[in-house]
Amino acid sequence: MSTTPIPSGRLAGKTALVTGAATGIGRAVAGRFSVEGARVVIADRDAAAAERAAAEIGTSARTAVMDISDEASVQTAFAELAEAGWAPDVVVANAGVQLFGKDAKAGDLDLEVWRRTIDVNLTGTFLTVKHAVRSMLAGSPAGGSIILTGSPTGLNGEGADFTAYSASKAGIHGLTRTVAAAYAGTGIRVNTVVPAYTETSLVTTISDDPEARRAIVGRIPLGRAGAPRDVEGIMVFLASDDAEFATGALFAVDGGMTTL
């Protein structure tokens, strides 16, 4: 049974940027960060949806229009935030795509689907991390928390029919460890949260198909699909100073899915 979290003020004084924050997991995390005391930047390529999300959160939120697959867009967004006094000391690289009906087993996968998925999920995450690191190194003091969104498909064979998506998430897991090791001495921490199948607008192809949904939920030992609220708590922890000794790690929030 879920309960409404009691605000702890764990993120008071922090500024957090969340990509893909207009909907789904990103929206839930941004809202929870605000409840916990952070100023929140709703970063999304959909400007209108980002504005709606920011309005729902209130005066502690603002928007940044950002296409994570376009370096100029990412760089400009970070520069504008710094100029406005909103340079983030927490960055959640959450935005991504999963091209249902196009992603496929390797022998059947179109190169353009592969490229589009990698461009957004892996290259886009890299670009977000790259400019987050630069921004955090320029802070006084330097440092901060970077949190990536992974997937069980990047750890095991869950995504056998989703070659591009699974490979992109495996790359994100590797990127986490590499960047964490490279910047550990600067006060920058990098971790990845690995949610199970989480019902958002990204996965309606599965959630609207009773047979497909039953099959995937059947592989989750806790017996239910994930919801965006399930990811909020671990994100708050990793963003907070309570996690100051955690870096380079993958935190599974998957109902036990990766134990099988």
Image: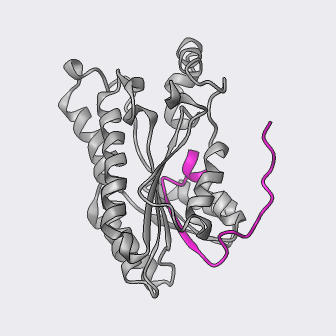
Q: Residue at x 65, y 70 (%)?
A: 11
Q: Residue at x 37, y 75 (%)?
A: 185
Q: Residue furthest top?
A: 211
Residue 208 in view, yes or no: yes
Give the image location of residue 233, x and y in percent.
65, 52
Q: Is residue 51 magenta?
A: no
Give the image location of residue 143, x and y in percent.
44, 76
> Is residue 180 positioned above or below 166 on the image?
below
Q: Quadrant of residue 240?
A: bottom right
Q: Is residue 40 left or right of residue 67?
A: right
For the record, the magenta segment spans 1-28
Give the image location of residue 170, x and y in percent.
33, 40
Image quarter in which the N terminus is found = top right
Residue 76 in view, yes or no: no
Q: Is residue 44 left or right of residue 237?
A: left
> Is residue 208 positioned above or below 132 on the image?
above
Q: Residue at x 62, y 34 (%)?
A: 226
